[in-house]
């Protein structure tokens, strides 16, 4: 009985040492430091409760326009067309267009399109002009940071 208890205790201690020594080096405990080292400089969140309601409304309202602009940009580059999801889009800025005859707002979003299983292709910015009549015009789509 004493020998069986000794073997079980030795097995448990061996497994505990394995967990303590090996798992941190494979970055399986807590946040992945490898992901932080290679992370793109992009302020996205899936915690929508922390965002202003106006930001959520703009992202939701413009998502189909953002997806179409992304599709046109990457098709024109001859690259695989990535996916754009709401949780990888943030509102960067709102600006009025002082040169427009009628009230026009420029809305810029930052997004992180991805291919396959959420492999980011980079960080992009897209700017739209929203006129007083509700017309939405794509002003600019550009890549601001390529994925490593």
Image: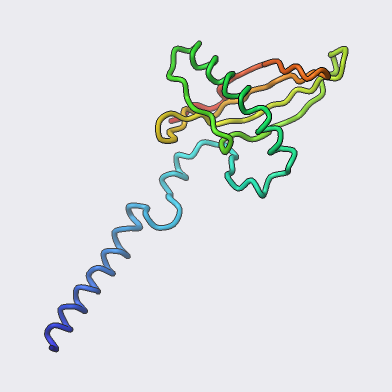
Residue 141, relative to residue 4: is it above or below?
Answer: above
In-image side of 33 versus 66 (left or right): left
Up the image or down, 23 lies above or below 110; here it is: below
Q: Above or below — where is 118 with respect to 4?
A: above
Give the position of the C terminus as an image quadrant. Answer: top left
User: Residue 122's spot in the image, x, y percent?
Assistant: 50, 28
122 left or right, relative to 62: left
* Residue 111: percent from left, percent from top: 58, 30
User: Could you tell me which residue is drawn at 59 percent across and 40 percent down?
Assistant: 44
How far across and down, in percent of the image, does residue 68 sit?
58, 19
Left or right side of 106 for 140? left
Q: Residue furthest bottom?
A: 2
Residue at image coords 69%, 45%: 51
Color theme of the render: rainbow
Q: Position of residue 66 (x, y in %)?
A: 61, 24
In terms of image quadrants, where is residue 35?
Answer: top left
Residue at horizontal 73 percent and vertical 42 percent from the top: 53
Residue under the point 32% across and 58% down: 23
Count of numbered tags? 0
Q: Which quadrant, please, contains the N terminus?
A: bottom left
Asked whether 82 or 122 is in front, the reply is 82
User: Is 22 drawn above or below residue 107 in the view shown?
Assistant: below
């Amino acid at each position: 009985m004493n020998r069986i208890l000794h073997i079980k205790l030795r097995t448990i201690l061996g497994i505990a040492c394995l967990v303590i020594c090996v798992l941190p080096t494979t970055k399986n405990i807590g946040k992945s430091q490898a992901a932080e080292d290679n992370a793109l400089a992009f302020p996205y969140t899936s915690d929508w409760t922390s965002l202003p309601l106006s930001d959520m409304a703009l992202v939701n309202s413009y998502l189909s326009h953002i997806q179409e602009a992304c599709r046109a940009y990457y098709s024109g580059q001859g690259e695989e067309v990535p996916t754009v999801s709401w949780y990888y889009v943030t509102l960067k800025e709102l600006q009025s267009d002082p040169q427009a005859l009628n009230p026009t707002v420029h809305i810029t979003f930052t997004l992180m399109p991805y291919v396959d299983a959420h492999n980011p292709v980079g960080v992009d910015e897209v700017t739209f002009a929203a006129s007083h009549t509700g017309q939405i015009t794509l002003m600019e789509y550009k890549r601001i940071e390529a994925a490593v």
